[in-house]
């Protein structure tokens, strides 16, 4: 799934003086320790739900009583860190997620 800013940003305006800066890779953007802890704390509930098997994003959001746009950054974080992988990408964002071995060790 593409980045939210890329999908809904103002990049189409092009020549209006808005500089197009490429997003820094996740490794180049360290998070504050508190933010890292918060993402892992909420992420642990996501990992626990995935422990029983593959799950689709929309179903996971329903089970956790969260909106998909709240859940997406957490999923992205977990994917970037190797705890979860997207096994099937859906055009509308209902991707299928799979817990990796690293994610299983964390749960």
Image (tube, helix red, strand yellow):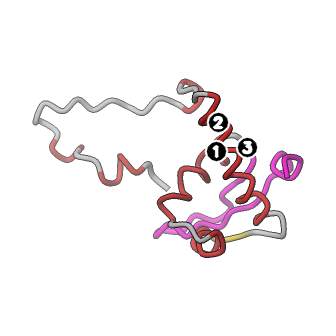
For disc 3, the neighbor class at 10 Å (few under 14, some 14 to 19, many from 20) is some
User: Rounded to the nearest whole Å, what is the CA distance between mark 3 and mark 2?
Assistant: 14 Å
Q: Is residue 36 above or below residue 30?
A: below
In this picture, residue 51 sits left or right of residue 15: right
Q: Residue 82: which disc?
A: 3
Q: Position of residue 22 (x, y in %)?
A: 38, 31
Residue at image location 84% in from the left, 47% down from the top: 106
Magenta segment, which residues? 82-107
The mark lying in front, picked from 1 and 3, is 1
| Residue identifier under label 1 | 39
Residue 7 or 35: which is nearer the viewer?
A: 35
Residue at image location 66% in from the left, 74% down from the top: 63
- Are dots 2 and 1 in contact, CB under 8 Å? yes
Residue at image location 22% in from the left, 46% down from the top: 10
User: Rounded to the nearest whole Å, what is the CA distance between mark 1 and mark 3?
Assistant: 14 Å
The mark lying in front, picked from 3 and 2, is 2
Upstream in sequence: badge 1 or badge 3: 1
């Amino acid at each position: 799934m593409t980045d939210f800013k890329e999908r809904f940003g103002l990049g189409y305006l092009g020549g209006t003086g808005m500089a197009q800066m490429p997003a820094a890779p996740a490794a180049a953007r360290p998070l504050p320790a508190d933010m890292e802890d918060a993402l892992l704390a909420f992420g642990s509930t996501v990992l626990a739900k995935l422990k029983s098997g593959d799950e689709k994003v929309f179903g996971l959001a329903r089970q956790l009583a969260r909106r998909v746009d709240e859940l997406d950054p957490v999923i992205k974080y977990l994917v970037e860190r190797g705890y979860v992988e997207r096994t099937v990408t859906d055009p509308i964002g209902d991707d299928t997620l799979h817990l990796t071995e690293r994610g299983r060790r964390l749960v």
